[in-house]
């Protein structure tokens, strides 16, 4: 079983890669990192599945321009899943509107056939 530090490092690596791909608008590369069961809840309350999430990036409906994300805690869920939470400040164009968002987030990553995939994501805006 992985140590807490190993799991924290894994969470940071997975999230850094996901953000890099999102910032590059690389929906194709993101596909393998995303579970078919994805539940992605945006800070607006809109919920996407895998296809809607990837389509928003692919079509430019959401364009991520910058992100400063920091994981604060990681909680193991057995040997094949974990929850991580933290804070993120990002700049994005969302449906044509420029936004600067400061949020807390929670992600759930699960391992399927030795591949880690994002299963759930939820952000909540922090007060200005």
Image (cartoon, rainbow, N blue to C red):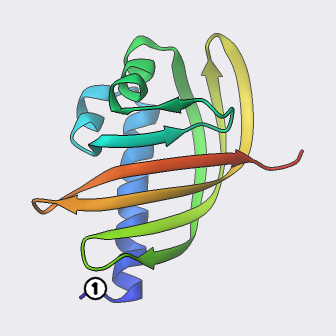
Q: Quadrant of the N terminus?
A: bottom left
**What is the crowding at mark 1: few (fewer than 14 residues within 10 Å), some, or many (at least 20)?**
few
Residue 43 sits above or below residue 116 on the image: above
Q: Position of residue 104 (x, y in %)?
A: 67, 55
Measured along the vertical axis of the image, is residue 5 above or below residue 127? below
Q: Position of residue 47 (x, y in %)?
A: 53, 32
The percent coordinates of residue 7 (x first, y second) are 36, 77
> 128 or 76, which is in the foreground?
76
Query: Within the image, what quadrant is residue 80 found in?
Result: bottom left
How many numbered marks does the figure carry? 1
At x 36%, y 51%, the residue is: 119
Left or right: 116 with respect to 66? left
Q: Quadrant of residue 108?
A: bottom left
Side (left or right) of 60 relative to 43: left
Q: Secondary structure at mark 1?
A: loop
Residue at the limit of the structure toward the right, as seen here: 128
| 103 vs 47: above or below | below
Residue at image x 59%, y 43%?
67
Q: Which residue is painted at 58% across and 54% down in the image?
A: 69
Residue picked out by circle 1: 2
Left or right for 114, reference 86: left
- The image quadrant where one finds the C terminus is top right
- Spot occupied by residue 106 in the image (x, y as percentages of width and height): 55, 57
């Amino acid at each position: 079983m992985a140590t807490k530090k190993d799991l924290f490092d894994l969470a940071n690596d997975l999230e850094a890669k996901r953000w890099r791909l999102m910032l590059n608008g690389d929906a194709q590369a993101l596909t393998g990192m995303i579970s078919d069961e994805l539940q992605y809840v945006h800070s607006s309350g809109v919920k996407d599945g895998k296809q809607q999430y990837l389509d928003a990036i692919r079509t430019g409906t959401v364009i991520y321009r910058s992100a400063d994300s920091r994981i604060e805690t990681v909680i193991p869920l057995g040997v094949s899943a974990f929850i991580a939470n933290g804070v993120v400040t990002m700049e994005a164009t969302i449906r044509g509107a420029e936004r600067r968002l400061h949020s807390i987030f929670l992600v759930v990553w699960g391992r399927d056939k030795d591949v880690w995939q994002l299963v759930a994501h939820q952000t909540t805006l922090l007060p200005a």
